[in-house]
């Protein structure tokens, strides 16, 4: 195979991988997981508020 054949094959392989990731990400089975991940920054920490070891300093 010539160099241009390898470039074409490599491009086709990467394009197929990209399409596969897009299909995986937009599949209905992943919606619940992605919704949970999207809400993580909005959830309260579940740390014990009586813990004095973290008060007034960095972790």
Image: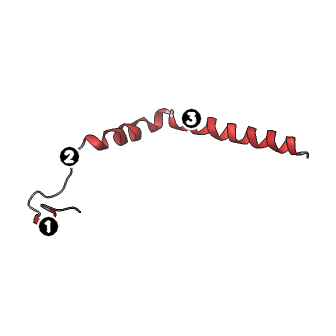
Q: Are marks 3 and 1 in contact (CB under 8 Å)?
A: no
Image quadrant where one finds the C terminus: bottom left
- Residue 22 figure quarter: top right
Give the mark nearer the N terminus: 3 vs 1.
3
| Quadrant assignment, res 57 | bottom left
Neighbour tally class for label 2: few under 14, some 14-19, many 20 plus, Cα within 10 Å = few
The residue identified by callout 3 is 22
Residue at x 31%, y 39% (from the top left corner)? 39
Local crowd size for mark 3, using a 10 Å CA cut-off: few (<14), some (14–19), many (≥20): few
Residue 10 is situated, as x and y percent measured from the top left of the image, at 76, 43
Outermost residue toward the right in this view: 1
Between 9 and 28, which is closer to the camera in this rendering? 9
Identify whether 27 is placed above or below 37. above
The mark nearer the N terminus, 1 or 2, is 2
Q: Which residue is mark 2?
A: 44
The reply to whether the C-beta atoms of the residues labelled 1 and 2 are less than 8 Å apart is no
Residue 12 image point, x, y percent: 75, 38
**Residue for badge 1:** 53
| Whole-percent x, y for residue 9 in the image | 80, 41
* Residue lying at 42% horizontally and 35% vertically, measured from the top left: 31
Q: CA distance from mark 3 to mark 1?
A: 44 Å
Structural distance between the alpha carbons of marks 3 and 2:
31 Å
Q: Residue furthest front?
A: 57
Q: Secondary structure at mark 1?
A: helix
The residue at the point 10 percent across, 65 percent down is: 52
Proximity of marks 3 and 2: CB atoms separated by less than 8 Å: no
Give residue 37's mark.
Answer: none
Direction from residue 54 to residue 41 in the image, left or right: right
Secondary structure beneath label 2: loop
**Percent x, y for residue 24?**
54, 38
Marks 1/2: CA–CA distance: 19 Å
Q: Earlier in the sequence, mark 3 or mark 2?
A: 3
């Amino acid at each position: 195979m010539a160099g241009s054949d390898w470039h074409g094959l490599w491009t086709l392989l990467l394009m197929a991988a990209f399409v596969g990731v897009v299909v995986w990400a937009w599949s209905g089975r992943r919606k619940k997981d992605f919704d949970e991940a999207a809400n993580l920054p909005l959830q309260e920490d579940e740390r014990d508020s009586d813990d004095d070891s973290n008060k007034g300093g960095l972790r």
